[in-house]
Amino acid sequence: MCSYIVKKAALAGSAKGPKGWMKIDTANIYYDHPYHAPFDHALGIDFVNEADGGRERVAVELSATAARELVRQILAALENGAKEHGLDGMSDDAPAYLT
Amino acid sequence: MAYQGLRANMVSFRGHDGFQSEAYYARPTRPGKIPGVVVIHHMPGFDEWITEIVRKFAHHGYAAIAPNLFARFGTGSPDDVTARARPLGGASDAEVMGDVAACMACLRCEPNASGHVGVIGFCSGGRHAYLAACTIPQIDAAVDCWGGRVIVNNPADITVKRPVPPIELTEKLSCPLLGIFGNDDKNPSPNDVNRTEETLKRFGKAYEFHRYDGAGHSFFDWNRPGYRPEQALDAWQKVFAFLDKHLVATRRQAA
């Protein structure tokens, strides 16, 4: 299907693209026909800085299976990392102005 | 074999609300009157595949023009521009119809224009072709290639940018319509196509649908895993037979 349906996640962080590191504040997430990944449909994520106009992006296209695996490993990394660093793993240690 | 010579380049035009936009334009170099086709691009955007389609029409004897419907979202590679357009809902129906009508006028203004103009659209462009056939006057033929959301099943798909499902405007369809669909497509699904066909019959419209087994969405696109060469070759023959019948064989005074 071809759709304008996009899920948005408000983010605090940075991404590195061809031009180097950039601040990001949003992930636009959609399941649709990919541009590069060799699938009929893919989970697309565009990491952007909407506050700066959103012109630049760091993009990924994943199969549905890969996307679900990524979700699992993200959660696992957060849990393991919290234990390793003695953190509770549920709060950001970012400065307040970034959250 | 004497192949058709053609010329292709980017052009500027004033679209909806006077927006200074751009289009890809290809036409045969042969003498004589030439029919026109507006090519409405798919949701992936104003990409290389659409330029290849425009040149294909010129190769087959048509002046073809594809407006960049995402020009209002800035410049850049097609996928980056579409990535900007996507979360903003893309171009509105009003903008697309304005841009298509402007491109039709451009085709008719050419000194060698035959005066016959059709529209063809792919994916979201197929929906736009259906909408154009219902709302823009003086279209001589329209081709809807797998346009989803002609029938709207999810109320969330009714938006400020797309306020009226095209199916609700079918009574105003003013030209012959060709539809090309893959039976494995989910949007439009075979049931969606059935319902569209029922509506066209109810209003006594001239239409011709071709539905292909083993093909899903966008089966003409040779860059995608969904490309189906056998079905695509047959469907292209249907497209050119239809357009030749309504844009070439029928004579009319140029506007």
Image (tube, rainbow, N blue to C red):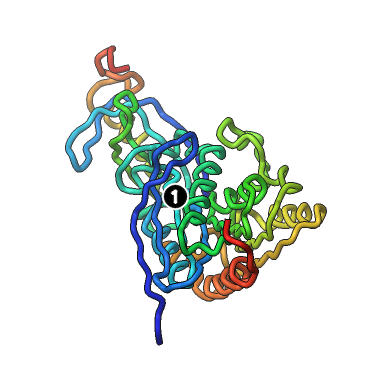
The answer to whether residue A37 is above or below residue A20 is below
**Quarter residue B252 falls in:** bottom right
Q: Is residue A95 left or right of residue A47?
A: left
Q: Residue pushed farthest top?
A: A96
- Chain bearing mark 1: B
Q: Of A7 and B36, which appears nearest the observer? A: B36
Q: Of B59 and B169, which appears nearest the observer? A: B59
Residue at 38% across / 54% down in the picture?
B47
**Quarter residue B236 falls in:** bottom right
Q: Of B12 and B184, which appears nearest the observer? A: B12
The answer to whether residue A95 is above or below residue B113 is above
Q: Residue pushed farthest left?
A: A20
- Residue B6 rendering spot, x and y as whole percentages: 37, 69
Q: Is residue A71 left or right of residue B119?
A: left
Residue at 77% across / 52% down in the picture?
B199
Residue at 28% across / 13% down in the picture?
A97
- Quadrant of the snapshot with the C terminus of chain A: top left
Q: Residue beneath label 1, please?
A: B67
Q: Of B122 and B143, which appears nearest the observer? A: B143
- Residue A9 rendering spot, x and y as whole percentages: 41, 29
The answer to whether residue A1 is above or below residue B52 is above
Q: Is residue B78 visible?
A: yes
Report how many numbered discs are placed on residues in the image: 1
User: Secondary structure under badge 1?
Assistant: strand
Q: Is residue B41 visible?
A: no
- Residue B222 rendering spot, x and y as whole percentages: 43, 66
Residue at 48% across / 72% down in the picture?
B32
Neighbourhood count class around disc 1 (C-alpha, 10 Å): few under 14, some 14–19, many 20 upward:
many
Which amino acid type is marked by label 1? Pro
The answer to whether residue B240 is above or below residue A92 is below
Q: Is residue B174 left or right of residue A73?
A: right
- Residue B22 rendering spot, x and y as whole percentages: 38, 47
